[in-house]
Image (cartoon, rainbow, N blue to C red):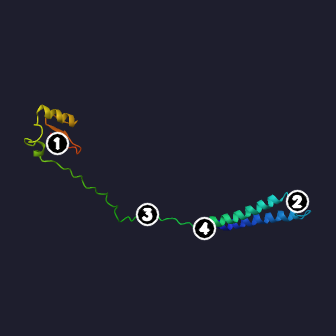
Amino acid sequence: MNSFGKSIIISAAALAMTFASLSTASADDGWHHHHNNDGWAIGAAGLATGLIVGSAIARQPRYVEPGPYYDEDVPPPPPPYYAPRRVYVQPREAYYPGPVAVGLRPWSPQWMRYCYDRYGSFDARTGTFVGYDGARHFCVAN
């Protein structure tokens, strides 16, 4: 017997007990004189109604989304491919240019002071500094 049928039988039994108590209370001096049993009767009727409505709501069909389908013959997808980053490397000539016509002459005391003040990563041995791109650049004072 399914649970809906059980709920109907229990609800019918609760309803029968409610009506049995109503008829006993009504057999006395009249319904309108004895209000002590009215609360019990109304509560039992509410309980029976709640059981019937609740069992009807609980038995509604539910949608369950199907899970993923896996076929054993098909291999899993490959891992994602990420292309390597392109890194621009300056030619060697760009690191050590020839004489600069404009600005300070390389390796002069004024040039060294300028490069030390402008770039915190300045290396006096090579005359270069580390740029934001991570590469070393020759200090040119314009």
Q: Position of residue 129 (x, y in %)?
A: 18, 39
Kind of residue at badge 3 = Pro
Q: Quadrant of residue 128?
A: top left
> Looking at the image, is mark 1 or mark 2 earlier in the sequence?
2
The answer to whether 122 appears left or right of 48 in the picture is: left
Q: Nearer the viewer, residue 74 or 57?
A: 57
Splitting the image into 4 quarters, where does residue 45 fall?
bottom right
Label 2: element kind: loop
Residue at the top extreme, as displayed: 109
Please say if 106 is above or below 6: above
The x, y position of residue 109, in whole percent, is 13, 31
Q: Are marks 1 and 3 in contact (CB under 8 Å)?
A: no
- Of the image marks 2 and 4, the number of the one nearer the N terminus: 2
Residue shown at 82% from the left, 60% from the top: 38
Disc with the residue nearer the chain's start (2 vs 3): 2
Residue at x 12% of width, y 47% of height: 91
**Residue 68 disc label:** 3
Q: Residue 132: percent from the left, percent from the top?
A: 24, 44
For numbered disc 4, what is the local secondary structure? loop
Give the spatial CA distance, label 2 vs label 3: 65 Å
What's the CA distance linking mark 1 and mark 4?
74 Å
Q: Amino acid at mark 1?
A: His
Sequence-first disc among 3 and 4 = 4
Position of 125 with respect to 50 (left or right) is left
Task: Tell me the residue that label 1 is attached to.
Answer: 137
Among the two numbered marks 1 and 4 on one chain, the one whose residue lies closer to the N terminus: 4
The residue that mark 2 highlights is 34
Q: Which residue is mark 4?
A: 60
